[in-house]
Image (cartoon, rainbow, N blue to C red):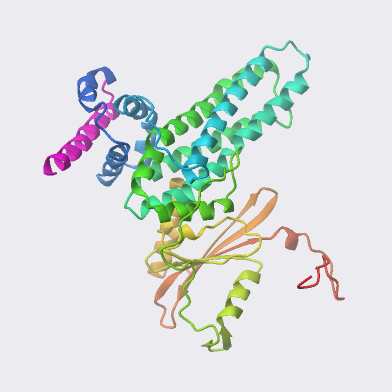
Amino acid sequence: MSELIDNHAKRIQTLKGIIRQLHRGVDPAEVQSQLRALVGQTHPGEIAAMEQELMAEGMTVEEVKSMCDLHATVVQEILSGPQQATAVPAGHPVDTFRRENVALREAVSRMRLAISESTALPPDAGAGDARLRLRRELNDLMEVDKHYRRKENLLFSCLERHGITGPSKVMWAKDDDVRALLKGFEQALGPTPPSADELATVFARVAEPALQALSGMIDKEENILLPMALQTLTEEEWGEIWQQSPEYGWCLVEPRSGYTAPSPATPELTVDLPRGRAIQFPTGSLNFEQLSAIFSTLPVDLTFVDADDRVRFFSEGPERIFPRSKAVIGRKVQHCHPPASVDVVERILGDFRAGRQNVAEFWINLRGKFVHIRYFAARDPQGQYLGTLEVTQDLTPLRALAGERRLLQYDAPLAAIGS
């Protein structure tokens, strides 16, 4: 057993050495002998461990991401081509991820064909139809966001429970690159579509890098992430991912039937307060049912992060602006954000914890909504920091108000309760 452990550790150290050499600009041909010694012996989990150790030793997420495509080629060689896929039941989360990846590969091929045919058209020869086709294909590619959000919020959350955080950060950063490139392509296509000559330039500058990045992420998921996750996560965690996935939706395909999620190991909801007993506040009392109803009724989304930076609670209103899943509970809040915004999160928490600030707020335009996001430092009567409350609200209808309303008027009819 000790020999196996030593071999495992040696492979990771060898991998780290190879990647550091490539990072310094060494020709990949110079490390071929080292690569040959690893071919067929290295497991996907060791690739992830290598990335995590590099970051633990001081290499930043941005540095690892910058050489990600280079060492992906090395990893492909080490793993001796595409991995033999572990069989899972139809409808298992991995089955759905894989089928979505197949659909995404097909969408990439259709987009390349659509662009090729569009750039070959003579002036004014069905250009309008060609542009519509490009937008239709791009809409399919934009569906990858649902795939990525399930991966980032559910799969990564479960991997973090097993101490696997480094590869998640790198993949999230690469996911965001794909999103940004697809968004840039979308902007280049409208509202005034480029000419055939301009489209060739747009394709080379924005579209092709996006398609390459998306295809590269599919390879990383199939050869590293999903095999590693299958080796790591418990059946209960896969059931948890399956149960919470509908919150984020599906990318191009629907899950198949056949998978039955195992019963959770612990009750989904633990209530320390007896349901008939009230909590006494300085300004009144509420029982559990009343508290739950209030949180579900408030026209804002609430998330509470404790003094140790772990997510402890979120409200479940009927129309959350940013989806949340129960897998986030207990997760470090830094891991709930894309790497590019973690420094802002750290600054807010640091300022709140040190007592330098009590409120931070942002407002953004999101899918036609004007969204207000506020962070509040929660403190006890002595001023001790207890955590941070995030309050998110869609202000679009409020900004549209004008004049006065002094008479009772319901904005929408409501069916009778119980009907």
Q: Is residue 106 above or below residue 173?
A: above
Image quadrant occupied by the N terminus: top left
Query: Residue 165: x and y, percent?
Result: 35, 48
Position above or below: 262 against 214: below
Within the magenta stretch, is there residue 8? yes
Q: Nearer the viewer, residue 255 or 52?
A: 255
Q: Residue at x 54, y 36 (%)?
A: 100
Q: Position of residue 5 (x, y in %)?
A: 16, 42
Percent across and percent down for residue 411 are 82, 66
Q: Is residue 244 above or below residue 19?
A: below
* Magenta-colored span: 1-27
**Secondary structure predominantly adopted by residues drawn in magenta:** helix
Q: Nearer the viewer, residue 231 or 301?
A: 231
Residue 193 visible in rendering: no
Q: Position of residue 18 (x, y in %)?
A: 24, 29
Q: How many marks?
A: 0
Residue reaching furthest right? 407
* Residue at image coords 67%, 15%: 117
Residue 256 occupies quadrant: top right
* Residue at the image position 26 percent from the left and 43 percent from the top: 53
- Is residue 409 visible in the rendered image? The answer is yes
Depth check, front residue: 383 or 87: 87
Q: Is residue 138 left or right of residue 359?
A: right
- What is the residue that sits farthest to the left in this orientation? 2
Residue 134, picture quadrant? top right
Q: State which quarter of the image contains the C terminus.
A: bottom right
Q: Is residue 239 part of the magenta span, yes or no?
A: no
